[in-house]
Amino acid sequence: MTIIDQPRAPFVMPELPYDRAALAPHIGAETIDYHYGKHLRAYVDNLNKLVADTQMADQSLEEIVRGGAGAIFNNAAQAWNHTLYFLQLSPTPLRRPSGGLSAAIDRDFGSFDAFVEQFTKAALGLFGSGWVWLASDADGKLTIDAMPNAGNPLTEGLTPLMVVDVWEHAYYIDHRNARAEAVKAFWNVLDWRVAEERYGL
Ligand code: MN
C-alpha cells in the first residue's frame, strides 16, 4: 500500500524505487536531480524549519496539509504532492488500471480513453503552476481535480489517487515549454498499480 503520510516532523524524503535515469526519455535523469533532489528537498527542509517548535511538529503530514495555511500549507502540500508524484512513476508501469478502479473510471468518465482525454485537457487547461488529480470521494466516485499552486484534494475531503505536476519545473529540462509533450510522456511512466492501491483507502 502506497501511504504518503508521515506521523510527525522531522519529515523525510521518499526513497525513489527506481534509478535516476530509469524513466528516460520521458523524464530524464537531470529532471530527477532537480525536481526530486532540489525542489522536493527544499519543500521538505522548509517544512521542517517552519513547524519546528510549533504544535504542528507533532502533527502528521496529512494533518498539516488539511489544517495548515500560508507557507506551512504550501510546503507541506508540496512535500505530500511530490511524494505521491514520484512514487507513482515506474520504468515498468501498469499502463492501464484494472479491477474496481477500471470499472469506476468507465462508470464516471465513460471509458479509460475518455478519462485520459479529459484528464489531459484539464492538465493543459490549468493556467500557471499546479497539479491535476484523480481523486475519489468516500463512496468511490471519481473526479478530476485541477488545482493551482500546491493544491491537494485532501483539503476537500477527497482521497488523491494519482497526479500530474504541471509546474514548469517538472518538465522544462526535458520538454522546455511544451506541457502537452510532457503530459503525453507522463502516461508512459505512470504506474496504475499505485492508484489502484490507494483506491478505497
Ligand atoms: Mn514539482
Image (spheres, rainbow, N blue to C red):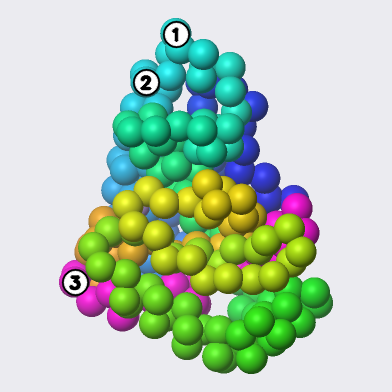
Q: Amino acid at mark 1?
A: Asp
Q: Quadrant of residue 53?
A: top left
Residue 179, position as x, y percentages in the image: 28, 74
Q: Which residue is mark 2?
A: 50
Instruction: Using the numbered discs, state the Cα–Cα distance from disc 1 to disc 2 in whole angstroms.
Output: 8 Å
Query: In the visual, does 45 lie left or right of 8?
Result: left
Q: Which residue is mark 1?
A: 53
- The mark nearer the N terminus, 2 or 3, is 2
Viewer-closest of 118 and 16: 118
Q: Which residue is mark 3?
A: 177
Residue 127 on the magenta span? no
Instruction: Using the numbered discs, state the Cα–Cα distance from disc 3 to disc 1 in whole angstroms.
Output: 41 Å
Instruction: Please say whether residue 201 is visible from this viewpoint.
Output: yes
29 up-or-down from 49: above or below:
below
73 up-or-down from 107: above or below:
above
Q: Amino acid at mark 3?
A: Asn
Q: Quadrant of residue 137?
A: bottom right
Residue lying farthest top? 53
Q: Secondary structure at mark 3?
A: loop
- The mark nearer the N terminus, 3 or 1, is 1
Magenta residues? 176-201
Q: Residues within 10 Å of mark 1 (few under 14, many from 20)?
A: few
Residue 197 on the magenta span? yes
Residue 74, position as x, y percentages in the image: 36, 39
Residue at 45% in and 42% down: 77
Residue lying farthest right? 99
CB of mark 3 near ligand 1 (< 8 Å): no
